[in-house]
Image (cartoon, helix red, strand yellow):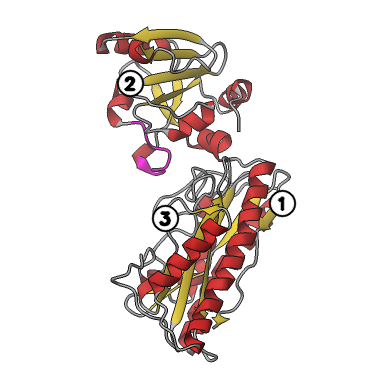
Amino acid sequence: MSFDLKRIQNSLSARGMDGWLLTDFHHRDLMAYRILDLPVKFTSRRWFYFIPAEGEPKRLVSKVESTKLDSLVGEKRTYLSWKELHQALRDMVSGYGKIAMQYSPMNNIPYVSVVDGGTIELIRSFGVEILTSADLVQEFEAIIDEAGYQSHLEAGGLVQAIKDEAFVRIRDFLDRGEKLTEYELQQFIARRFEENGLNCMEEYPIVGVNGHPADPHFEPTAENSVAFKDGDQVLIDLWAKLDKPGAIFYDITWCGYIGKNPPADYVEVFHVVRDARKAAVNFVRERFRKKEKVFGYEVDDACRKVVVDAGYGEYFVHRTGHSIGEEVHGNGVNIDNLETMDERQLVQGICFSVEPGIYIPDKVGVRTEIDVFITLDGEVIVAGDEQEELILI
């Protein structure tokens, strides 16, 4: 979305914040560039942009890169020495009590906590209370407009089709008596992405059999991958977006079995994660139906309870889901009360994954993943097919 000063100031006032201080050095904070609608160009000096809840913004840039923020409105000041920088920053925030920065207490939300500790110390030394900008970042960087949502749906149709091709390819190779490895199938998926105008940002799909996906982030390589064979349990996790500016990722995981009669314990584990996934979505839908607030940590609890009650809690070793945006792991609310306690609210216009998993070391890894989008009118939608039973390959 484009930079909207008035909307930001209204949001600051509503949250009881006196201002929002955005800063960057060497592209450490790409969120700030997107929020301010700044081009990401060569940047070798620190810049600061202060948006007060009321009044004119303030720009502070190095004399070496004095035009860095010229596309933005507001009073402009330049610095050369570090002493000038410190004094200019003091003057910039003087008279303001509570200022938001890209900071998260105790690093609870590391996606947002990108301002270095020294800068936080410096601003605090001026008598300012620093608040987390996590909710602001979600509002002005993670909300997806209609064009973004349509790009998500278009990518979803292509990714789902390529997923189907991948499972069929396993059977085709086996029927011909030819060898096909996890790595070779991963590379096939990546090629199909490129052929269909999709971009996975050089983070390639996860393809694993049996105990390999018990490592949730298993990376098949030419050296560690094995060939598919009858009786294998298969997991494929794939994500991509349209290869164009502003496109939103689509991210899914499906599981299958090579044969007609999967083992009962494998079916049981899959059904547990499937039911946990459905419980999470139903929880969100019910809250929105009642027009009640819902937070990331609560959805994780609702999902995780199903896995815990089934006796597999110790094997569900990651959060339930993550924000999805122009990056596959976006900067909105995560569905998490394990790795962090994400207290951000689920709001209209966000997209996130729901992906419970059970990972029994050296034995099995099962995950089922869907993407959930909350429309601007509050409808909770799952884009694309939802896996109900194992794919029999």
Between label 3 and label 1, give the one nearer the viewer. Answer: 3
C-alpha span from label 2 to label 3: 30 Å
* Residue corresponding to mark 1: 379
Assign the N terminus to one quadrant of the image: top right
Q: Position of residue 171 (x, y in %)?
A: 52, 83
Q: Tell me the kind of residue under disc 3.
A: Glu
Query: Which one is in front, 382 or 14?
Result: 382
Q: Please report the residue visible at 42 percent of the width from the left and 67 percent of the height from the top.
A: 316
Mark sitting earlier along the chain (2/3): 2
* Residue corresponding to mark 3: 203
Q: Position of residue 377 (x, y in %)?
A: 73, 45
Magenta span: chief secondary structure = loop
Q: Position of residue 46 (x, y in %)?
A: 34, 21
User: Which mark, by number, is residue 45?
Assistant: 2
Q: Quadrant of residue 87?
A: top left
C-alpha span from label 3 to label 1: 31 Å
Which residues, given as a range, are shown in magenta? Answer: 107-115
Q: Please report the residue visible at 56 percent of the width from the left and 79 percent of the height from the top.
A: 391
User: Is 308 included in the stretch rendered in magenta?
Assistant: no
Above-or-below relation of 81 to 178: above
C-beta proximity under 8 Å, tags 2 and 3: no
| Disc 3 element | loop
Q: Tell me the kind of residue under disc 1.
A: Glu
Mark sitting earlier along the chain (2/1): 2
